Image: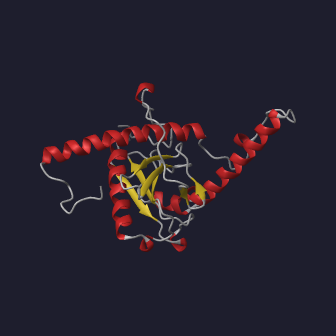
Amino acid sequence: MTDTPTESTNTFQPPPTDMRLPPLKLPPNLTFGPFPITPSQAFHISPSTLSYALVNLRPLLPGHTLICPVRRVPRLSQLSDNETTDLFLTVKRVSRMLERVYKADALNVAVQDGVEAGQSVNHVHVHVIPRRKGDVVVGDQVYERMDGREGNVGAVWEEYEVLQGRRKVREEMVERGEREISGGPDGEEGRVDRSEEEMREEAQWLRWEMEREAELEEMRKQSSGADETPGGEIP
């Protein structure tokens, strides 16, 4: 493990082509707040289909992901007991996977529960951020970034939607022969740091790793001779 600070978000290695999984089947009309979610962004749906996990458009550090309830509500207190249990069981499972694959020493797990707490998308979501010795963001500084422009998830998603719309218009104009390709969203101020392809590759990789995590979890249960949660998890 290196002590050299790094902020690169391209630290993942996609699974081999012959191990790629079919597209993730999402619940109908799945959204993150007002934003539609696609299989290129989501990498896990809980077995109960009450929660899902997605890659971040602009991660604060490598591996920064979001876990959300499928049902759109703005506050934790508005979730049902089953939704709350499932959400945090999903956080636990995704966290364990991220810590393993990013070789993390620790994790930041955070909820901005309401606008005054810094919530920028009115849909409950849990930030999970793998942490390693030598991170360029030291200790609690990650929360300062989360509260600042870098962590404004809502603004990032709105920007992404705008740029995707502009890209579609440009492509249609090129097809009609009305203009040539030059400049465009990737060169504009405020561009989204990651492309659709980068997010798709990371989501595919993390989905594959979640499948492995399920196998590892079953092996851990068998070796311990008992479930980790005697009260029983949501199937």
Looking at the image, residue 219 lies above or below residue 123: above
Q: Residue at x 36, y 56 (%)?
A: 48
Looking at the image, residue 96 lies above or below residue 81: above
Depth order, front residue of 100/89: 89
Say left or right for 223 vs 161: left
List x then y, in percent, for residue 77: 42, 74
Which quarter of the rendering shows the N terminus? Answer: top left
Q: Is residue 72 visible?
A: yes
Depth order, front residue of 172/148: 172
Looking at the image, residue 79 lies above or below residue 137: below
List x then y, in percent, for residue 150: 57, 55
Q: Residue at x 55, y 47 (%)?
A: 38
Say left or right for 197 vs 20: right
List x then y, in percent, for residue 199: 54, 41
Residue most extreme to the left: 225
Q: Residue at x 42, y 41 (%)?
A: 206
Which quarter of the rendering shows the C terminus? Answer: bottom left
Depth order, front residue of 37/95: 37
Q: Is residue 189 visible?
A: no
